[in-house]
Image (spheres, coloured by chain):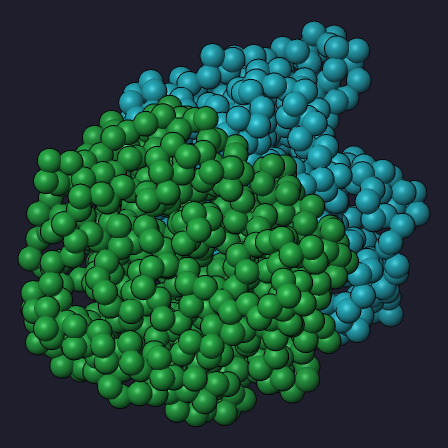
Chain colours: A cyan, B green
Amino acid sequence: MWFLRINMTDRSWKLEEVPEAYRNLGGRGLTSTLIYDEVEPTVHPLGPNNKLVFAPGIVTGTTSPTSARVSVGTKSPLTGGIKEANAGTGWAPAVAKMRIKAIIIEGQPEEDKYWMVYLSWKDGQPSVEFLPADEYVGQDLYESFKTLYEKYGKKTHITGIGLAGEHRYPNSGIVFDDMKQRPSRYSGRGGVGAVMGSKGLKFIVVNDKGAPGVEIANPDLFKQGAKKLRDALNEHPVTKPKGGLNTYGTAILVNIVNEAGGFPTRNFRSGRFEGAARISGEAIFENNKKRTGKEVYNHACSPGCVIQCSNTIYAKDGSEIVSCVEYESDWALGANCGIDDIDGIAEMVKLCNAYGLDTIETGDAIAVAMDAGVLPFGDLEGAKALIHEMGKGTPMGKILGGGTGMVGKILGNPRVPAVKNQGMPAYEPRAIKGIGVTYATSTMGADHTSGYTISPELLGSGGKSDPLLSDETKITLSRDFQRTTALLDSTGHCLFIAFAILDIPSGFEGMIEEMNGLLGVNWTAEEALALGTEILKKERAFNEAAGLTKADDRLPEFMKYEPLPPHNAVADLPDELLDKVYGEL
Amino acid sequence: MWFLRINMTDRSWKLEEVPEAYRNLGGRGLTSTLIYDEVEPTVHPLGPNNKLVFAPGIVTGTTSPTSARVSVGTKSPLTGGIKEANAGTGWAPAVAKMRIKAIIIEGQPEEDKYWMVYLSWKDGQPSVEFLPADEYVGQDLYESFKTLYEKYGKKTHITGIGLAGEHRYPNSGIVFDDMKQRPSRYSGRGGVGAVMGSKGLKFIVVNDKGAPGVEIANPDLFKQGAKKLRDALNEHPVTKPKGGLNTYGTAILVNIVNEAGGFPTRNFRSGRFEGAARISGEAIFENNKKRTGKEVYNHACSPGCVIQCSNTIYAKDGSEIVSCVEYESDWALGANCGIDDIDGIAEMVKLCNAYGLDTIETGDAIAVAMDAGVLPFGDLEGAKALIHEMGKGTPMGKILGGGTGMVGKILGNPRVPAVKNQGMPAYEPRAIKGIGVTYATSTMGADHTSGYTISPELLGSGGKSDPLLSDETKITLSRDFQRTTALLDSTGHCLFIAFAILDIPSGFEGMIEEMNGLLGVNWTAEEALALGTEILKKERAFNEAAGLTKADDRLPEFMKYEPLPPHNAVADLPDELLDKVYGEL
């Protein structure tokens, strides 16, 4: 097992045997530990001393179901703290199969020039070539991917940045290929694309031909665990084939969250959107049926997934607009901007993919701008034009590329739905208190994936908790979810296995057994969860040293004095309680 | 003695007897104490819960020399911490003479509308009228001042905001009138103008006719102190009539600082500017002599000043371009942008005055943009056009209005000379170590006025300290200067009396006696300085609660690895030493 270190100052590389202390880590556990261990927390995120780490999960690259995820870790130009953003992609298992635990990008070239890395298996080990990439600069990512796949073949896998990363936007993601070689799977949040851009690195193309595959210490135990988990996924109504996610995609949440009054609308001015039904997962399914003449179930974003929740949006003529429109993108570019045209939303998602933008941050940023009078809410053509400005890098595009918080600062709008400068996702924290605790306290800034209390608060999965209840139970709830998630993000599994492992005991058991089998360890569930706690503690310590404090663990002030319709709820969890999430970790 | 509270939510006002605890405070001591006591540190700077305080100094409004200063205090939209920015202006004594210790602006109107306050003496007390001010919105401040003085007479005094404050720029100041009714005296730093704008307040016009004047508890002691101070000012070579400042203005520093290799040039890429001589105080004096046909000595910015350091820049035809061009403005818009045309610099200062912009932050912001390739260094016409964009509020103008740090973030340039997000003034911290300690640790962000160690480091005043010496003596030096300055900023005196009180013992004595005489107290020098310490502690506590940490007490990372010509010095004072400035306060 290796760390592959790539130095962009002199374009050199080396393989290092993974030190003992890192052997049992993967995904977020590994990226956050490496950033914590190797990056001075006060470095400039875009300077030569920041690092960018790619790490597949612990079981990524194996036959374990729904496990093809890669974590990207760095110091974030958006939050100023540590960042982990993960994606599901064939790129992840390809790297894992080369027995690379992490790719660590270091340094910075002196000249303003872009390179790509070609990573392949050669003479019994991974091998790196540096190739000039200036020809791709300024290009639409769909175009670049087409060229790259023509050059290197459809069996390779690609990660890279688009114009957003080239412009060094705090609102730039890192893209990965999906199953049809689309540039559509994103480590979206926190400006990780800008860090890649600051390293002069445009793409990493991986060809795993000849790679030996992932080492498994105890194959029988591993297989047993993987089977238990697969069975659970195949059984749970949310994750099973033709289940909720496979049929309606993540946008199945639109109607649910809207019904609960927690669907942020028009820059968080209301919790209910009158156009929700038109942009719901159900509407997408029905549209697709009408437009293709058949029931279209969703597909997998990456190899080996049971859940298969990625939709495709088909146009009226039956052609593909984009794949896929996730719930959060649908909301960010839809309800939050007052837009209820699902085709228009799909077009905007495609633009974000083409430019390398985070859809959530993009929607939030446009909504804050709309709120400040730049455009009227609901102006689809205007919103599209703004995304094009972001691609082109016009001054207005650069303002929006700065992300939600920056737009608020530049336009003088105090109504900024962000924590630690990261724009909020698709759940209103005033109406769904637990997710508010996660937004406020997560090491990542406002991030639903870092402690998805929506499961018990709205979906009846993993227990049940009244969304409007505002008391200490929400602190415990969020803390438990944050801890479990830190573990989950390390396994290489998609967060959506959570439904199956929270509700079906043998599913959780299976996940632990898989890891024990693969690593040759003997973790109890508690020991595994302790790993989650350790990760959070490191992330928190990094953030503290970087200058983040309790004052950054708060929802935006306007949510404290502005009641949210229809429940007229305000952010009312006392600061002392919020401080207990990490105070009592 | 009153506090005048003005509530902009409902446009009401009231006078409060000054509570005992605030009686001996004035200027910065009063603004910082009120902000500390009344503003929750985590509020949004532009939201309804921030406050804006105007407080004349303790001896302001009396016959004390060089004492017509007013402090403006608030939570800063630029730094996110507490802010005090003071200015010399006839507005300050006018308010003091009405026995108003502080004007406290609170609340926020619901509609997007501007008001002005007309403050006059009526029936034995100050009285407030609210008048619509929408007619002045979008106007050049020179134009507005002209109209206002025509309306209200030349004996009134005006403070207000220009387009920069209307746009809510973190780079907006609050303007005050000078002796010729020009909108030229600024509480410039920290975005205080945006806070005034967020309150819907455009101007405060003061008419002190009939006001009783400042109460003096012990007139004899007061007069004795004022005389000692006046004598010292008249004696010191820097402050005496036809002395250094009266002859060459603050721009006398250009050649001195440049010679020392500490004159930041082209966004802090060098410490020496080949065009320095052309923009120096000496050049200004010679130009003026040539252009007006006589030796032109400087004038006072405000009533009762002995030093009289404000220059006027005359054009080739003998007409006035602007008054005045301070050293820091000269540097910011000149050397730091690679511009050596003093007339061009004067025109840019006039534009900043007209739009209500902080000249230092403007120069820094433009220089970071130049460094990022927006314009070539030295492009005067381009720089002027950018200032006009700031006035107009184009997207590029708004980016620059965001200030130095924001420009760096938006343009992806890590070479940002700022601390706590406030752009650095005209002294290179790598080449002049003591001022670097002040920049790093001051509660105000990078601010030369908050601990002007330049005196001993370059001017041989208040002792002597080798500028390039990098050791613990610089910590003590900066701490002592920061403490003394906090006191000085409370007295109402201009910082420039520092030369006379540091070098002439009777001058310092006089300052203490004045305060004792006015307040009817019996402070020793140590007790007076302890007041300075108390102010710093409150400011620091506010900042900590607002979320600032040790990580914010650092010079920018690039200064640690990028050597500065000609000395090739880097920022090398260890963090542990920097932490002692406030750690051992």
Question: Would you place residue B453 above or below residue A132 in this image?
Answer: below
Question: Would you place residue A18 above or below residue B548 in this image?
Answer: below
Between A98 and B286, the residue placed more toward the observer is B286
Q: Quadrant of the C terminus of chain B?
A: bottom left
Residue A502 location, quadrant: top left
Residue that appears at 24% across and 68% down: B64
Between A90 and A376, the residue placed more toward the observer is A376
* Residue B38 in picture, x, y percent from top left: 21, 49
Single out the residue that lies furthest toward the front. Answer: B293
Residue that appears at 55% across and 60% down: B312
Q: Is residue A95 visible?
A: no
User: How many numbered marks are there?
Assistant: 0
Residue that appears at 52% across and 34% down: B139
* Residue B410 in picture, x, y percent from top left: 62, 49
Between A46 and B580, the residue placed more toward the observer is B580
* Residue B45 in picture, x, y percent from top left: 37, 45
Question: Would you place residue A291 above or below residue A540 in this image?
Answer: above
Residue A472 location, quadrant: top left
Q: In this rendering, would B301 be left or right of A157?
A: left
Q: In this rendering, would A18 be left or right of B95?
A: right
Q: In this rendering, would A475 be left or right of B462?
A: left
Q: Is residue A146 visible?
A: yes
* Residue A36 in picture, x, y percent from top left: 51, 67
Between B361 and A500, the residue placed more toward the observer is B361
Residue that appears at 61% across and 75% down: B282
